[in-house]
Image (spheres, rainbow, N blue to C red):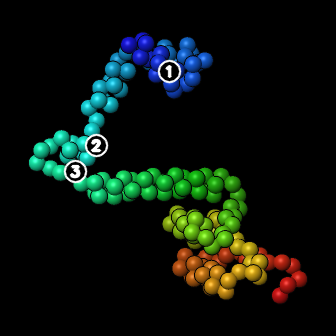
C-alpha cells in the first residue's frame, strides 16, 4: 500500500514532492478510495449490465450536458460574485455578443444589476449595425437596468 500511496503522490504532486506528501496518505484512506472507485458505476453502466434494460445513449448525453451546464453556470456565478462583492464599482463591458449577454443575464439573476452593485458599459463605435443598439435597448428593458454607452468625443 505504501507503494500505491507513493505512486499516487507522485502522480498528483510530482516526483520531487513525494516525500513531503506520501506520509499523509494512510493505507485505510487509499483502500477506501480504491474500493469507492471500484464500486461506483454510472447509471449507464448499470443499465448496460442489466440484461432487461438497454443503454439509452441519448438520455446519457442529455444528462451529461445538463450536468456540465449546471457546473459552468455555478463557476461563472461564483466568479461574478467574487468580482462584484470584493471590488468596488464593478463595470462589465458588453459587446452584445452571446457570452456578454450570458454574463448580463447572470448578473441580473444574482440581483447585481437591480441594486446597482454592477454596471454594464457599451462602446458605440458608430460603425455598429443599427440592430445592435436596438438590441441593447431590448436587453435594458428586459433586465431593468440602464447601460453606460460610451462613444467618441466630439461626435454627436
The answer to which quarter of the image holds residue 66 is bottom left
**Residue 24 visible within the image:** no
Left or right of 84, for residue 43: left
Which residue is pictured at 77% across the width and 78% down the height? Answer: 125
Q: Nearer the viewer, residue 117 or 134?
A: 134
Mark number, residue 42:
2
Q: Where does the image place residue 128, in percent across and percent down from the top left?
A: 71, 80
The answer to which quarter of the image holds residue 19 is top right
Vertical placement of residue 134 versus 77, above or below: below
Which residue is pictured at 57% across the width and 69% down the height? Answer: 98
Q: Rate crowding at label 2 as few (under 14), some (14 to 19) or many (20 or more) other CA atoms within 10 Å.
A: few
Q: Earlier in the sequence, mark 3 or mark 2?
A: 2
Distance, label 3 to label 1, CA atoms, is 36 Å
- Helix, strand or loop at label 1? It is helix
Q: Earlier in the sequence, mark 3 or mark 1?
A: 1
Q: Earlier in the sequence, mark 1 or mark 2?
A: 1
Which residue is pictured at 53% across the width and 79% down the height? Answer: 142
Left or right of 87, for residue 143: left
Q: Nearer the viewer, residue 48 or 4?
A: 48
Which residue is pictured at 18% across the width and 51% down the height? Answer: 54
Distance, label 1 to label 2, CA atoms, is 27 Å
- Helix, strand or loop at label 3? It is loop
Mark number, residue 9:
1
Q: Where does the image place residue 122, in percent across and percent down from the top left?
A: 70, 73
Left or right of 12, for residue 121: right
Q: Tell me if label 3 and label 2 are in contact, CB under 8 Å.
A: no
Mark number, residue 55:
3
Q: Nearer the viewer, residue 138 or 40?
A: 40
Q: Nearer the viewer, residue 42 or 122?
A: 42
Q: Where does the image place residue 78, in percent across and percent down from the top left?
A: 54, 52
- Helix, strand or loop at label 2? It is loop
Amino acid at each position: 500500500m505504501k507503494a500505491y500511496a507513493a505512486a499516487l503522490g507522485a502522480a498528483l504532486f510530482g516526483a520531487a514532492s513525494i516525500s513531503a506528501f506520501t506520509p499523509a496518505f494512510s493505507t485505510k484512506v487509499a483502500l477506501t478510495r480504491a474500493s469507492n472507485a471500484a464500486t461506483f458505476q454510472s447509471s449507464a453502466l448499470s443499465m448496460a449490465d442489466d440484461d432487461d434494460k438497454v443503454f439509452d445513449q441519448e438520455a446519457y448525453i442529455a444528462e451529461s450536458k445538463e450536468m456540465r451546464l449546471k457546473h459552468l453556470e455555478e463557476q461563472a456565478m461564483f466568479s461574478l460574485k467574487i468580482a462584484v462583492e470584493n471590488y468596488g464599482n464593478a463595470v462589465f463591458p458588453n459587446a452584445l455578443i452571446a457570452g456578454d449577454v450570458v454574463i448580463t443575464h447572470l448578473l441580473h439573476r444574482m440581483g447585481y444589476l437591480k441594486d446597482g452593485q454592477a454596471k454594464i458599459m457599451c462602446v458605440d463605435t458608430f460603425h455598429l449595425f443599427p440592430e445592435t443598439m436596438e438590441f441593447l435597448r431590448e436587453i435594458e428593458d428586459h433586465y431593468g437596468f440602464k447601460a453606460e454607452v460610451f462613444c467618441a468625443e466630439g461626435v454627436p
